[in-house]
């Protein structure tokens, strides 16, 4: 990642922090306090895939990040424009999911809705759809939709609609037209119990990943209080690939591009995206997980050459 950004002449100075091999009493996880302070100070960060041993009592690193940095929204970009034909129609969808609760639930919902419309405006998307489950989480979804409607009034140029989960399936999966420039806004853990909303957000992601066969080309960025952005690779951990030069660098790079857009380094982000798309389209530099035989360094070098 650093090699690609250096080749693109991205003006970023890196601060590197390692996850500890024992619990940090200040964070109650393997995540160190220094890494959190670095992100708070800089306002942005990139998280490599991380994991903790199964059965440990410590909270997960992901939850530590989310709670300590108040990461209220998870933003994922599902895009079929990277050289692979999706199972259905072409897809260009962004999901903005609420992923934390607060003392004032309406404030959290409003923040998520505000960011979804802000993202739609700044990225040229003309529609926002709020997904809900009225039969299961009536009260909290009602509050969620109320906040969405209030925010929608501030963005008259963006179309706003409310759809149920079933209608979302028909619109996205069974649609006979290409799905483009659609921002899906879903309630996450802000429900009476964490389960229903969390299941809804995971359900949406699962369907979209099914439509796009290559999950490696889904990018993700978490947004927190004060404009903090924490990018991360979607596929998660792959312990079998550790230090074997086999991992696919594309997911982390695509998530890094989202962070660059957040930092308003649009030219640099577009330059890297074009290089990634060109590398995929050439079809000669791919890791084993997407049908190729190349090593991580080989793919990285190809992307740098295309930059």
Image (tube, grey):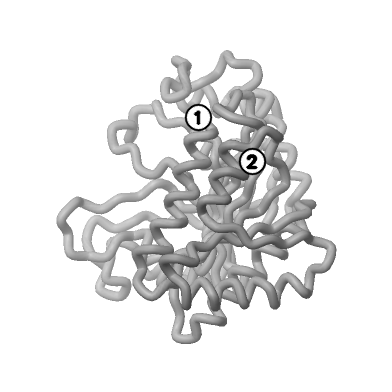
Q: Are the residues at dot 1 and dot 2 in contact (C-beta closer than 8 Å)?
A: no
Up-down relation of residue 121 to residue 206 (above or below): below
Residue under the point 44% across and 15% down: 293
Up-down relation of residue 37 to residue 282 (above or below): below
Residue marked by disc 2:
6
Residue under the point 35% across and 72% down: 193
- Tell me where residue 186 sits by quadrant: bottom right
Q: Is residue 52 left or right of residue 252?
A: left
Q: Marks 1 and 2: which is nearer the front?
A: 1
Q: Secondary structure at mark 1?
A: loop
Residue under the point 37% across and 54% down: 18
How far across and how far down the image is residue 267, in percent? Answer: 78, 45
- What is the spatial separation of the Cα atoms under label 1 and label 2, in whole angstroms? 30 Å
Residue marked by disc 1:
213
How far across and how far down the image is residue 91, in percent? Answer: 64, 37
256, 183: nearer the viewer:
183
Residue 276 visible: no
Up-down relation of residue 122 to residue 1 (above or below): below
Residue under the point 78% across and 74% down: 154
Q: Quadrant of the N terminus?
A: top right
How far across and how far down the image is residue 224, in percent? Answer: 54, 69
User: Sequence-wise, which precedes: disc 1 or disc 2?
Assistant: 2
Q: Residue furthest bottom?
A: 103
Category of crowding for the residue at label 1, using alpha-carbon neighbours closer than 10 angstroms: few (below 14), some (14–19), many (at least 20)? some
């Amino acid at each position: 990642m650093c090699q690609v950004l250096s080749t693109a002449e991205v003006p970023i100075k890196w601060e590197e922090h390692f996850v500890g091999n024992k619990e940090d009493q200040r964070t109650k996880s393997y995540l160190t306090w220094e890494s959190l302070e670095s992100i708070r100070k800089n306002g942005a960060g990139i998280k490599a895939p991380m994991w903790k041993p199964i059965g440990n009592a410590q909270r997960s690193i992901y939850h530590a990040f989310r709670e300590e940095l108040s990461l209220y929204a998870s933003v994922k970009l599902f895009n079929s424009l990277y050289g692979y034909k999706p199972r259905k129609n072409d897809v260009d969808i962004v999901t903005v999911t609420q992923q934390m609760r607060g003392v004032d639930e309406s404030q959290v919902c409003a923040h998520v809705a505000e960011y979804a419309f802000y993202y739609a405006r700044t990225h040229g998307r003309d529609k926002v759809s709020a997904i809900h489950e009225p039969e299961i989480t009536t009260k909290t979804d009602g509050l969620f939709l109320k906040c969405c409607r209030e925010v929608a009034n501030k963005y008259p140029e963006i179309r706003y609609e409310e759809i149920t989960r079933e209608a979302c399936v028909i619109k996205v999966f069974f649609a006979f037209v290409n799905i483009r420039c659609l921002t899906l806004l879903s309630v996450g853990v802000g429900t009476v119990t964490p389960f229903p909303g969390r299941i809804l957000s995971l359900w949406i992601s699962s369907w979209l990943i099914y439509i796009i066969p290559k999950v490696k080309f889904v990018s993700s960025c978490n947004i927190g209080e004060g404009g903090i952005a924490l990018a991360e690779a979607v596929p998660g951990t792959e312990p079998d690939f550790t230090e074997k030069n086999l991992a696919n660098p594309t997911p982390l790079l695509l998530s890094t591009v989202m962070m660059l857009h957040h930092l308003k380094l649009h030219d640099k982000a577009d330059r890297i995206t074009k290089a990634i798309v060109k590398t995929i389209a050439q079809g000669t530099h791919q890791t084993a997980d997407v049908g190729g035989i190349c090593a991580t360094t080989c793919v990285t070098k190809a992307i740098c050459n295309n930059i």
